[in-house]
Amino acid sequence: DGGITQSPKYLFRKEGQNVTLSCEQNLNHDAMYWYRQDPGQGLRLIYYSQIVNDFQKGDIAEGYSVSREKKESFPLTVTSAQKNPTAFYLCASSSDRVNTEAFFGQGTRLTVV
Amino acid sequence: DQQVKQNSPSLSVQEGRISILNCDYTNSMFDYFLWYKKYPAEGPTFLISISSIKDKNEDGRFTVFLNKSAKHLSLHIVPSQPGDSAVYFCAASALWSGNTGKLIFGQGTTLQVKP
């Protein structure tokens, strides 16, 4: 089945440690995105990539880093510089057709302990 | 600044009645609008969309209305069912952004449909 897979579903991290969230898609989509959801807020864009080996900062990129070495994969690293990393992280992808929806993964709940 | 706003955090309706979820936007460059449904601890799933060249789009029980002059869109669910209980997000994008997947989301409205 085609789709987006995020792993792990739950992740615990000690304060001061970096952690990497995985996102893989087999939809042959060119574009991939990382969003963050906090309680009572909408989804905020962290980073996005429209093509392999290229990515751009979203609205809240500070404290995060990404790579796009393969079309299928777009991992997100939450660094120790991120001041409030506990959140629900969502990965999405979309084709390059005009006016098309983005498809989301099931999310990763990151908790800093 | 919040470019897409859903001013009602929650809505409760009776099963079988109409649910109306509202969304306002500020950026007149937005030309594509989407509604997503989200259950707790899951990713959002796409419901319905509308392009700015239309004022209405219908898909089964779901209808989205767009009022460009008022910069307002709404999602109507008729009839509402208990399984519709979820958080609904409105999202918008603009062709100028280079890719319609770069969506700007509202804060979400939690819909509860009571049996």
Image: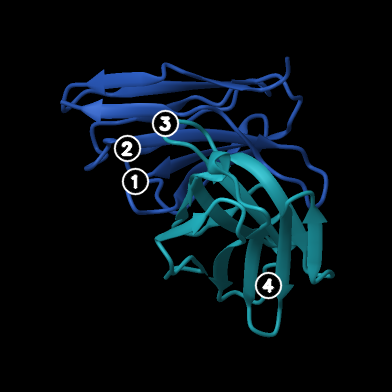
Chain colours: A blue, B cyan
Q: Label 1, on which residue?
A: A38
Q: Chain of mark 2?
A: A
Mark 4: give few (<14), some (14-19) or many (20+) Cα within 10 Å: few
User: Separation of disc 4 and disc 2 at Cα?
Assistant: 30 Å
Q: Label 3, on which residue?
A: B41
Mark 1: give few (<14), some (14-19) or many (20+) Cα within 10 Å: few
Q: Residue B8, image x and y in percent?
A: 43, 66
Which numbered mark, 3 or 1, is in the foreground of this view?
3
Which numbered mark, 3 or 4, is in the foreground of this view?
3
Which numbered mark, 3 or 2, is in the foreground of this view?
3
In what element is the residue under mark 2?
Answer: strand
Is any part of residue B63 visible from this angle?
A: yes
Q: Chain of mark 1?
A: A
Check disc 1 and give the amino acid type.
Asp
Q: Residue A87 shows which numbered tag?
A: 2
In what element is the residue under mark 1?
Answer: loop
Q: Residue A70 shows which numbered tag?
A: none
Q: Are marks 2 and 1 in contact (CB under 8 Å)?
A: yes
Is any part of residue B99 visible from this angle?
A: no
Q: Is residue A76 above or below residue B81?
A: above
Q: Label 4, on which residue?
A: B29
